Amino acid sequence: MRTIHGVGEMMTQMVLSRGSIFPLAVPDVTPSVHPNKQVVTIESEDVTVMDTKLKIIEILQFILSVRLDYRISYMLSIYKKEFGESSENVDGSVSSPDLPVITSVVVPDIDEIAAQAETMFAGRKEKNAVQLDDEGGRTFLRVLIHLIMHDYPPLLSGALHLLFKHFSQRAEVLQAFKQVQLLVSNQDVDNYKQIKADLDQLRLTVEKSELWVEKNSSYESGELGESQVKGGDEPIEEPNILSPVQDGIKKPQIDSNKSNNYNIVMEILIRLSKLCLQNKKCRNQQQRLLKNMGAHCVVLDLLQIPFEKTDEKMNEVMNLAHLFLQNFCRGNSQNQGLLYKHINLFLTPGLLEAITMRHIFTNNYHLCNEISERAVQHFVHCIETHGRHVEYLRFLQTIVKADGKYVKKCQDMVMTELVNGGEDVLVFYNDRASFPVLLQMMCSERDRVDESGSLAYHITLVELLAACTEGKNVYTEIKCNSLLPLDDIVRVVTHDDCIPEVKIAYVNFVNHCYVDTEVEMKEIYTSNHIWKLFESFLVDMARVCNTTTDRKHADTSLEKYVTEPVMNIVSGFFSSPFSDNSTSLQTHQPVFIQLLQSAFRIYNCTWPNPTQKSSVESCIKTLAEVAKNRGIAIPVDLDSQVNTLFMKSHTNMIQRAAMGWRMSARSGPRFKEALGGPAWDYRNIIEKLQDVVASLEQQFSLMMQAEFSVLVDVLHSPELLFPEGSDARIRCGAFMSKLINHTKRLMEKEEKLCIKILQTLREMLDKKDSFVEEVPGISWF
């Protein structure tokens, strides 16, 4: 505290004296005998002075960093105190099983923490002032304004950085506090130490890859392979790096045995990957710890090591590196965003890159909406030039739907590129020559289990087209109608050799492309195609009902087909507003009644899971409602059974809701108390920290706007900081001109600083008196 204050005061006294210009500034000198020599001397001295002032900026930057560290520590100490002695008992119980386990959950007072947080910032009512001078920051601002008035660009940029940093104190603290990683238990500490040691070793190994990555014979004989970087002789291993002990501390080292380095890297990658997942569940805290320690950056550097593609050991290393990145961002939107910044590393024809890209975009609507057309074109082009691989199509599937929402922009882009790809990408077995090939693949057990074969590619392609039309997209619907006509779909689905996997893909395609559409597809309502499909549905529905008693030989794929895609398309067709005007229902009443009977029969089977049962029940309700509205006579016994089903379903729903309410009202608090102990309080500490961050974000919002408003005022009228009649006040008349001219220079070199200045200038143009009353905590004027 006093150290920060003392250093800041000393620095300001070094560069300011009696409110005048810097005493270190060089006075005007009129050259006499040797004008050229005199001018050179002055310029040399001037550069020395400017460099000295740059050192002052570095010192001030360090002081502001110390101030930020203090505030983070202060916030964490407040947070720890709110948990009290019980929190300390948690730590003790983790390290020593002999200590008693707490029996209640500690709930910190978030409002109190947020109130104390405001005392960290300088103001008239501060309790813990962290200031740079005794004038509420005015002296510090005068120093920065003086520095900005110089004609030395590095000095000007450095002063502007400090100025913006000074007027974003709350935003800076909030952003830093969001990145805080709590190590609550001994296991967290052990993980941290292990990760740090692994990353140090991995970083060194990557930097010295030329010492251990094996080269082929052509490299050793002087001929470089395609993937090797040209250079001189192989470097000699440095003794200080190979030494395991230096200055009494064990250092990471490169193993003298080249082959062993492969094993070291692979072991590290396996350990890091396991930290991200446990029992196939994401471990967000460990993923966050790895992110904060920069594990992904080291692994991304590893991916860029040149090596021969025939090097099997290195290929295995790359597999593990991609596996880590996939687990690192699995179910974690923040980590996905970090890898998205390095997307160019994955725009290669490799299949591993395609799989990693899929994990980066999985269920991240924001990233999917941000993807460029270039990335979509790349993967479609990979299919054309590097073969029809399922991994490329699955990536395209990932970006057209995320978080249960349809990304129309991606649907349009993917559809356009697929059509442009033509026959190299779109493979349909719908002509006389190719249809027998499809039948042969469906009958071949080998083709059916091959996840990367031609049959799998065709199924995934149809699924992708269905996903592109899902959510009612008229543009993609019209395109798909011409690619896969109803005639060809019916011929495939109704064939005796058609397998459930193909049926699922095709029926989903019909549902999204012909039934659940933005505009009416008259062909589906005027032709007999849909009724031929319904008749084939009846056959499959009867088949799954007959295997109820023999579950060992049950076809789960066929059961999934009849309970999900079939029920969805039946419900969608009869509930569609376009089907109301269709007269085909009157002529196909027997098929309609059989659909209702078969659906009811499946509902009474014992094998459907809750999701499947819900889908079947929804279909039954739709069919019953249509029969009632369209005047279709249903057999009396079937009608009675359906009505009983509705009554029973309604009663069960009410009972479940009532039971849930009673459980939450009566045993909810007891359940929480029963969870008291190290494991529950550990989770409580981590989760409550995020609540504190959210509270601070809400509390600081107005104050951050106030800080920015004061910054605008400072830049708009900097002369008000100086006494009237002083040289500094007079010089500030050219302040705005100098700021604008410097901003022009920043456009190419320092884009972020340029944007900040432009945003501030724009605020000046549209200045509003939003902060009439004095805001507590902002006291620079």
Image: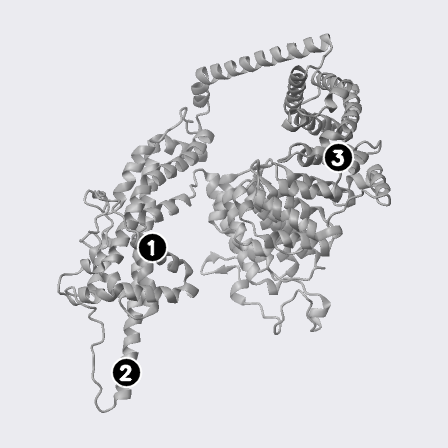
Label 3: which residue? 501
> Quick one: 507 or 665, which is closer to the camera?
507
Distance between the Cα atoms at labels 2 and 3? 84 Å
Q: Quadrant of residue 328?
A: top right
- Are discs 2 and 3 less than 8 Å apart at CB? no
Number of labels in the image equals 3
Q: Residue at x 43, y 36 (%)?
A: 686
Callout 2: few (<14), some (14-19), or many (20+) C-alpha neighbours within 10 Å? Answer: few
Distance between the Cα atoms at labels 1 and 2? 42 Å
Residue 399 point in image, percent of width and height? 60, 44
- Most extreme residue toward the left is 725
User: Closer to us: mark 1 or mark 3?
Assistant: 1
Among numbered discs 1 and 2, the one appearing first in the sequence: 2
The kind of residue tagged 1 is Arg
Q: Residue at x 69, y 70 (%)?
A: 220
The kind of residue tagged 2 is Thr
Picture layout, residue 627 above or below residue 769: above
The kind of residue tagged 3 is Glu
Among numbered discs 2 and 3, the one appearing first in the sequence: 2
Residue 645 point in image, percent of width and height? 65, 12
> Quick one: 193 or 729, which is closer to the camera?
729
Residue 617 point in image, percent of width and height? 65, 19
User: Closer to us: mark 1 or mark 2?
Assistant: 1
Is residue 464 among what the camera can see? no
Distance between the Cα atoms at labels 1 and 3? 58 Å
For residue 41, the mark is: 2
For residue 762, the mark is: 1
For residue 343, the mark is: none
